[in-house]
Image (cartoon, coloured by chain):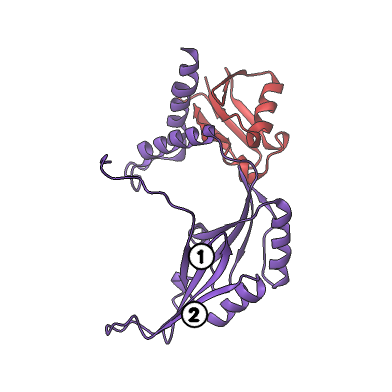
Amino acid sequence: MPVLYLLDVPEFSGAVSLLEREGAYRVARANGYVRIESDTDIVVERAKTNMNEAVWFGLTVAGFDGAIEEFNSDRLRIAAAAG
Amino acid sequence: MSNLVSTPQLHGVHHTAFPTWKPKSTVEFYRDGLGLKLVHAITARGWGRTDGHPDFLHFFFDAGNGAAIAFFYYIGTEPRPEFTAMKGYLGVSRHTAWAAHSQEELLDWRARIKATGTKVTPLVEHETLESIYFIDPNGYNLEISRTSRPLTEQDHRDADMTIEAMMSTFGDNNPDGRTIDDMWRLKGQLVAQNAFAAAAE
């Protein structure tokens, strides 16, 4: 089960609100962080987040559980850890 | 730390200093182009020593808020481009970033720099600051930034966890060949433990 942690701050709010809106993930908040849990891959499309590249490539600063399968200027995809 | 040693405070930058082999262009850029006031100039025969230290000038431009940017010109020495025009991301990593107070001030600086004939980037928005980047006639990387949101206790706590994850993952010089993904996984564990498990208690 992949997990993505996000800092709950204005610069990442585009990604946080997108993941909440999509409704496919379990979203929890605590102490300034947002936890995104999923039974399937977690996918974030940069075009839907309104984030520029300088900030986008720092999106995973709060960490994750699983495996980053894609992280380019268009998309972040986190899958469950292999094995 | 010993309790007997106090923790003294720093009060911002006094000056930073760099070698130059283009003293004329340096003055024309900083004083005449950027408009920084030339505030002090030292000239010396060597360093008062007899071990071959070259004669030199050391001159200072006001960079605001009590800080200066200073240069050494060592007369008669050969240029050493590895100290000035450092290339690539390592060159960019060593830079001076000055503070602007507003986006308007940053845009004014951008116009001023362009007027000197120097290339300058558009405004680049980072996590908590916004910057322009340019290069001086020596090849030194310069940045002017404004804070777009003040850092909070939350940012400090998050930095503590990131740096704990960094030191555990990489130590010095990454002897185990780990990746940033390894560090992010550890950071996720720290956040789970310190932010989420702590909230559930």
Question: Would you say A72 lies left or right of B169 here?
Answer: right
Question: Which chain appears red?
Answer: A
Question: Which chain appears purple?
Answer: B
Depth check: give the residue in front, B192 or B98: B98
- Pinpoint the chain carrying mark 1: B
The residues tagged by marks 2 and 1 sit, at their Cα atoms, a distance apart of: 17 Å
Q: Secondary structure at mark 1?
A: loop
Which residue position holds label 1? B87
Depth check: give the residue in front, B157 or B11: B11
Question: Would you say A20 lies left or right of B22 here?
Answer: right
Residue A72 at x, y = what percent?
60, 41
Q: Label 2 is placed on what type of residue?
A: Trp
The correct choice, above or below, for B25 with respect to A27 in the image is below
Residue drawn at x 60%, y 41% as measured from the top left: B150
Depth check: give the residue in front, A28 or A10: A10
- Pinpoint the chain carrying mark 2: B
Which residue position holds label 2? B21
